[in-house]
Amino acid sequence: MVLKVNEEVVQDSAIRAEAERMRPSYEEAFSEMAPAAREEQLLDWSRENMIERALLRQEAHRRGGQIPQGDIDSAFERAMKQRANEGQADKLSERQQEDLKKEIELQLRIERLIEEVCEGVGEPAQGDIEQYYEQNKGRFKTVELVRAAHIVKYVNWLTDEKNAYEAICKAQDELRKGTLFEQLVAKYSDCPENGGDLGYISRGQMVEEFEDVAFNLSAGQTSDVFRTRFGFHIARVYDRKPATTKALDQVREEIVGELAEQSRRAVIDNFVDALKAEAKIEEL
């Protein structure tokens, strides 16, 4: 499939390269489609992407104007640093460097064009922000958290079930006599780092047997000895944070950003559609 967009030819290889770039995320999103239909849609979307890019390039050139050389040089330096960070050690020839600078200049022209097109996009209205919040409250929920610590005796090739259980029972006995939990972590636990403190955990982070105990303790409460697939534990909960929905003022900035981006996308789409309506697009 070779396209001609006004006077610019878009080769089949470029369309297929775009399809390969899109493929990983595309196939994940449309995994339930029949393979043949999925491939046809992917190529169709790749074709549309290449047409839109060609039109934006052409319009950016048509509008002209100078891109400051300093902007081009700075972007070139960043591109070269990125190449080095990605392990691309091969040195570019002078011709390749000039070609890269031309690509950068073109990209900067397109970015300037997009900014001009979106110049009138302002901050969304308060009513739109509130409506978005109400319609998407599920996104702004926080999960239940507990800050837990534990004394653990592993059952493995170094310590059998009997010895591990006896050791954890000694820790429990001292705990009942008033010894501080953190001191017993240092004395008995096979995982004494940070005083056994695991930080704040949510459901799904730890093994189910541990969570069944930890999420049923109150803040300041310590469990009895219990068994998980790893061995024997005594858990202590320092703090609990219930699941909540964040207030609008906590997520307002995020919502404003998303609505502004939606508005920008709509303006750009309308602009590109107008370019398409005036363009001559042929399959060669």
Image (cartoon, grey):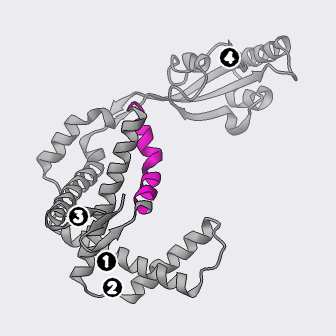
Camera-side residue: 83 or 261?
83
List the residue tagged with mark 2: 67
Q: Are marks 4 and 3 in contact (CB under 8 Å)?
A: no
Which residue is found at the position 33% from the left and 50% from the top? Answer: 45
- The vertical placement of 252 against 247, above or below, is below
Q: Are marks 4 and 1 in contact (CB under 8 Å)?
A: no
Residue 208 is marked as: none
Q: Residue 36 magenta-drawn?
A: no
Q: Nearer the viewer, mark 4 or mark 2?
A: 2
Callout 3, which amino acid? Ile
In the drawing, does residue 70 fall left or right of residue 77?
left
List the residue tagged with mark 4: 228
Q: Earlier in the sequence, mark 4 or mark 1?
A: 1
In the drawing, does residue 167 fall left or right of residue 130?
right
Give how far apart the Cα atoms at labels 4 and 3 are: 66 Å
Q: Are marks 2 and 1 in contact (CB under 8 Å)?
A: yes
Callout 2, which amino acid? Ile
In the drawing, does residue 19 fall left or right of residue 110?
right
Callout 1, which amino acid? Arg
In the drawing, does residue 235 fall left or right of residue 282?
right
Q: Earlier in the sequence, mark 3 or mark 1?
A: 1
Is disc 1 placed on a helix, strand or loop? Answer: helix
Callout 4, which amino acid? Thr
Residue 281 is marked as: 3
Quadrant where the N terminus sits is: bottom left
Magenta stretch bounds = 14-33
Q: Earlier in the sequence, mark 4 or mark 3?
A: 4
